Amino acid sequence: MIERQQQLENTVNERTQEIQYQKTLIEEKQIEILDSINYAQRIQRALLATDEILNKNLPEHFVFFQPKDIVSGDFYWAAETENNKFLLITADSTGHGVPGAIMSMLNISALEKAVDSDKLYEPADVLNSARTKIISTLAKDGSAEGGKDGMDCSLIRFDFMKMEISFSGANDGIWIFRNGTMLEFEPDRMPVGKHLRDKIPFNQIEIPILKGDLIFMFTDGFADQFGGDKGKKFKYKSLKNVLIQNAHLSMNEQQQNLANVLQDWKGELEQVDDVCVIGIKI
């Protein structure tokens, strides 16, 4: 009887040690993966528009950027052009997390080629060129049709000498708050990527701007967040109302208020997508 009990205890101890060993291995792997993702975040952050370039060209602005995971499919990118104009894009790459982050790097690379290498400064030309590059690159993914990934985005070129912006959008529009009214500018209903309409050039519109205008660029993450008493989507109408109500505040206060509204709305629910909202005061 004592011998059987001893054998049972030994068996239990062995199993406990094996469980602890496996637990330790899993924890070590989790740490390795997390360290890798954190390092990837540093690389991705280095590709985003810097505070320096934004502050230089847009003295009054805010960037509310809250990825769902450590790395993000959403991004914002900027470039100064040779003709003293300034390009700014907010974009939502296919996916989020690690796949979205990888896609965002391809998208940024395509934008950089269009602007820095090919010297394209018209927003529509930039999107057309980026689309061609993205489709060409993803055609090599091994699938029968080629990859259909890409990005939705809004791209603005600022010309402060003429007090004018040029806008092109791929599923993402822009809003301008002026004299108590929110003006809406619609995008083309197609992504920057493979699509039934991917042979159709993007449109571009020129919009006069006035001192005191507030320009808002955004991806769909804020509007699509579930929350509230009934667990429903926040929606664009509610986002517009928040931006209108905040319009009298400083840019920092507007950014903080957006963060508070999003947190209050989602409560204990999981964030469903990356969030990016940019506000610019002229």
Image: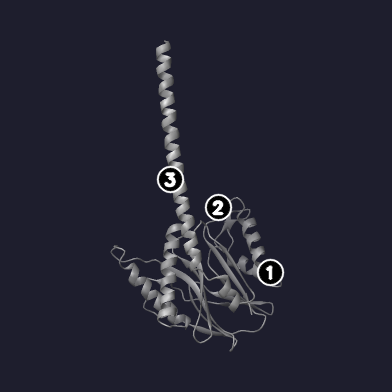
Q: Is residue 72 visible?
A: no
Kindly indicate the quadrant of the structure image that contains residue 104.
bottom left
Q: Residue 270 carries which label?
A: 2
Helix or strand or loop: what does disc 1 sit on? helix
Q: Residue 29 carries which label?
A: 3
Relative to the observer, which residue lies in front, 177 or 41?
Answer: 41
Of the pair 224 and 15, the residue shown nearer to us: 15
Q: Secondary structure under badge 3?
A: helix
Distance between mark 3 and mark 1 Cα atoms: 45 Å
Residue type (three-letter) at the residue carrying disc 2: Glu
Q: Which of marks 3 and 1 is nearer the N terminus?
A: 3
Q: Residue at x 60, y 50 (%)?
A: 268
Give the amino acid at mark 3.
Lys
Count of marks overlaid on the render: 3
Picture coordinates of residue 52 (x, y %)? 57, 73
- Say which of 55 and 90 sits in front: 55
Label 1 is placed on what type of residue? Asn
Circle nearer the N terminus (1, 2): 1
Which quarter of the rendering shows the N terminus?
Answer: top left
Q: Give the secondary structure at mark 2.
A: loop
**Left or right, residue 71 beside residue 279:** left
Relative to residue 94, is residue 184 depicted above or below? below
How far, Cα to Cα, is label 1 from label 2? Answer: 25 Å
> Which is nearer the eye, 58 or 125?
58
Q: Nearer the viewer, mark 3 or mark 1?
A: 3
